[in-house]
Image (tube, rainbow, N blue to C red):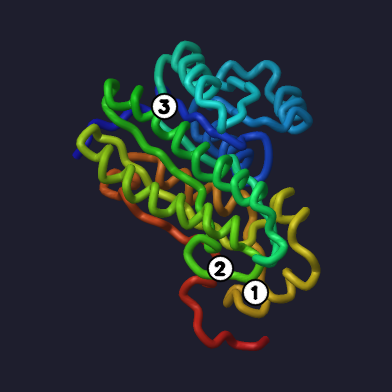
């Protein structure tokens, strides 16, 4: 059984932490006693988070472009300096699009891979270099059911999230000798600002038809799954796992029409 860090000393770094699943995860971790570095590139969202946590010494808030390698390394170093280490990482920063393969520009495809895949790699690698010398830790990547099953309009997004799935499994293998666990959560549709911007009424009707639970998830529901994977008192023997939190979508066949 690996050595367990006390809740008092646990530190998490969350990208895309100023909105949606990332923000809900930050709020849950703070409620559980973690110290949290909230990183995002959305200045408007960051402003709101700063206002909410202005006097909270357990929070560090900063802007970060996850595709900028030097900026990533600097953000990780600053988090270690501020909190004394990092025990958990959540790679929640990402972008999405719903476009037919014929209507998907190459520039959009490349940008999707850069943010969703390269960004996840850069942050995970930078933090793992710290964790390997400090007793290990846990990395949770945000994949998607679009990376597990082929869905319409997801040539760029689905390919990027499929890459996150494989990256997660490879990192789990490479980093296990250092006591670093790497897992991914594959959300179904979740009521986040990103989903609200992308999903049309027709999209919602389709999802409700094919999801056995007949609803979208909430960011808090995803945050609880992420917390489980971060917390080595609950998931110390779990690594390389892709955990779908999707209302039953991945496992469904014929769905009751009700």
Q: Which one is nearer the viewer's eye here, 175 or 90?
A: 175
Q: Which mark is residue 214?
A: 1
- Please tell me whether mark 2 sits on a helix, a strand or a loop: loop
Q: Position of residue 120 (x, y in %)?
A: 49, 39
Q: Which callout, 3 or 1, points at the residue further toward the start of the chain?
A: 3
Q: Which residue sits at x=56%, y=27%?
A: 68
Q: Quadrant of the N terminus?
A: top left
User: For the point 33% across and 28% down, which residue is it?
Assistant: 5
Screen quadrant of the C terminus: bottom right
Side (left or right) of 127 relative to 149: left
For disc 2, the marked residue is 247
The one nearer the camera, 82 or 92, is 92
Numbered circle sitting on residue 40 = none
Residue in the foreground of this view, choosing between 175 and 84: 175
- Contact between labelled residues 2 and 3, with CB atoms less than 8 Å apart: no
Q: CA distance from mark 3 to mark 1?
A: 39 Å
Crowding at label 2, few (<14), some or many (≥20) Cα neighbours within 10 Å?
many
Q: Is residue 227 above or below residue 72?
A: below
Mark 3–mark 1 contact, CB under 8 Å?
A: no
Marker disc for residue 126: 3
Q: Secondary structure at mark 1?
A: loop
Q: Name the residue located 35 percent from the left edge and 30 percent from the top edge.
A: 128
Q: Earlier in the sequence, mark 1 or mark 2?
A: 1
Circles 1 and 2: CB atoms closer than 8 Å: yes
In the figure, residue 84 lies in which quadrant? top left
* Image depth: mark 3 or mark 2 in front: 3
Q: Earlier in the sequence, mark 3 or mark 2?
A: 3
């Amino acid at each position: 059984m690996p050595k367990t860090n006390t809740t008092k000393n646990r530190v998490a770094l969350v990208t895309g932490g100023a909105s949606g699943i990332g923000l809900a995860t930050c709020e849950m971790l703070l409620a559980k006693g973690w110290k949290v570095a909230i990183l995002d590139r959305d200045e408007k969202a960051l402003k709101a988070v700063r206002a909410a946590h202005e006097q909270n010494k357990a929070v560090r808030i900063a802007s970060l472009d996850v595709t900028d390698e030097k900026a990533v390394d600097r953000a990780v170093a600053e988090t270690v300096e501020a909190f004394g280490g990092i025990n958990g990482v959540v790679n929640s920063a990402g972008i999405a699009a719903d476009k037919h393969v014929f209507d998907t520009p190459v520039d959009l495809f490349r940008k999707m891979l850069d943010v969703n895949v390269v960004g996840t790699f850069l942050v995970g690698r930078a933090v793992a270099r710290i964790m390997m010398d400090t007793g290990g830790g846990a990395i949770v990547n945000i994949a998607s059911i679009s990376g597990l099953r082929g869905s319409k309009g997801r040539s760029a997004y689905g390919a990027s999230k499929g890459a996150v799935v494989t990256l997660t499994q490879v990192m789990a293998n490479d980093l296990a000798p250092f006591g670093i666990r790497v897992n991914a959560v594959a959300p179904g549709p979740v009521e986040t600002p990103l989903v609200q911007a992308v999903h049309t009424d027709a999209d919602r009707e389709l999802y409700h038809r094919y999801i056995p639970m007949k609803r979208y998830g909430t960011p808090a529901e995803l945050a609880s799954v992420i917390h489980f994977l971060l917390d080595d008192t609950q998931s110390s023997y779990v690594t390389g796992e892709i955990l779908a939190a999707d209302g039953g979508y991945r496992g469904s066949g014929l769905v009751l029409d009700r």
